Amino acid sequence: MKKAWMMCAALLLIVTACTAQPVKSMPQPTPETVKEAVAAPVVTPRPTPTLAPKPTPTPDEPGKVVLAEGFYYFELSEGLKARITGKSYPADEKNCKIGYDDLRCVKLLHYDFEGIIHEGELIVHALLAAEVTEIFYELYKAQYPLYSVRLIDDFGADDDLSMEANNTSAFNYRQVEGSRSLSLHSFGAAIDINPFFNPYVEKGRVSPESAAAFADRSRDFAGKIDKDDLCYKLLTERGWTWGGQWRSCQDYHHFQKDIGFER
């Protein structure tokens, strides 16, 4: 009985000692820490894409032409036609100046800005499919970073949403903004590459607006397209025009190749 009493007393002393320990509080800010926080460099804004759920890919890839492992193009399957109709492709094919048979889907691999490899896809004109596949294969071998390469249909064919997500895309049947003429995107003959880091600039207006920090082309940053950029060199040497050299505006993400489309 005495032994049990002594054990209880010892246990009571241990509990009392533990509960008597002071609780550590979070350190309070001092004038020095506040000064350091204010003086810290401003981090360049990065896009935070909100993407639609990735559609289930169809195994149907008619007329498949393979360039290398992970790099090939094929005719639009019925599943792919259903996926884009009413979005990037008009619901009424009769009012469209390009048919499904004139387009090809390019499958590719690409590195992101953290060095992670992803699958990507573009829809382009059939006459440009081979060279577009070759260009993106060269970019892949050089580990050129592309933030996202997805059909614009994953963004409801909304060009603004795709640019906000820094998404590289090609085909989208639409008019040039502020014009009645069809964009070369309508024929799968234009590609927008890393558009958040390479925005559209016209008379001080930047699109997307949240990418204004990247309108300053004197800065150096990953993904910047200029005349020294590999993407610029690969496309222009094959006859593509870069929107960053236009006079009335600078479309730094835009490349196009007009091979005689009636617009």
Image (spheres, rainbow, N blue to C red):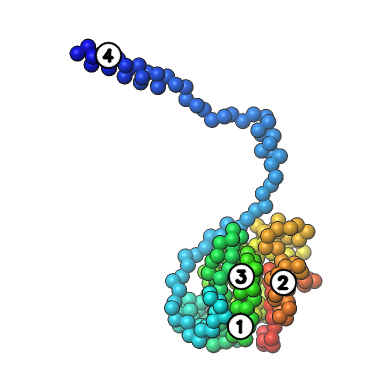
Closer to the eye: label 2 or 3: 3
Closer to the eye: label 4 or 2: 4
Can you identify the residue that label 3 sits on?
140
Dots 2, 3 in contact, CB < 8 A: no
Residue 71 percent across, percent down from the top left: 55, 76
242 horizontally vs 160: left or right: right
> Residue drawn 54% across and 30% down?
26
Q: Residues within 10 Å of mark 1 (few under 14, many from 20)?
A: some
**102 over 26 or under it: above or below:** below
**Which quarter of the figure has residue 161?**
bottom right
Q: How crowded is mark 3: few (under 14 residues within 10 Å), some or many (20 or more)?
A: some
**Three-letter amino acid code at the position of disc 1:** Ala
Q: Residues within 10 Å of mark 4 (few under 14, many from 20)?
A: few
Can you identify the residue that label 4 sits on?
6
**Earlier-in-chain disc, 2 versus 1:** 1
* Numbered mark located on residue 232 in the image: 2
**193 over 257 or under it: above or below:** above
- Let me know if residue 174 appears in the view: no
Real-space Cα distance between discs 2 and 3? 14 Å
> Residue drawn 50% across and 79% down?
85
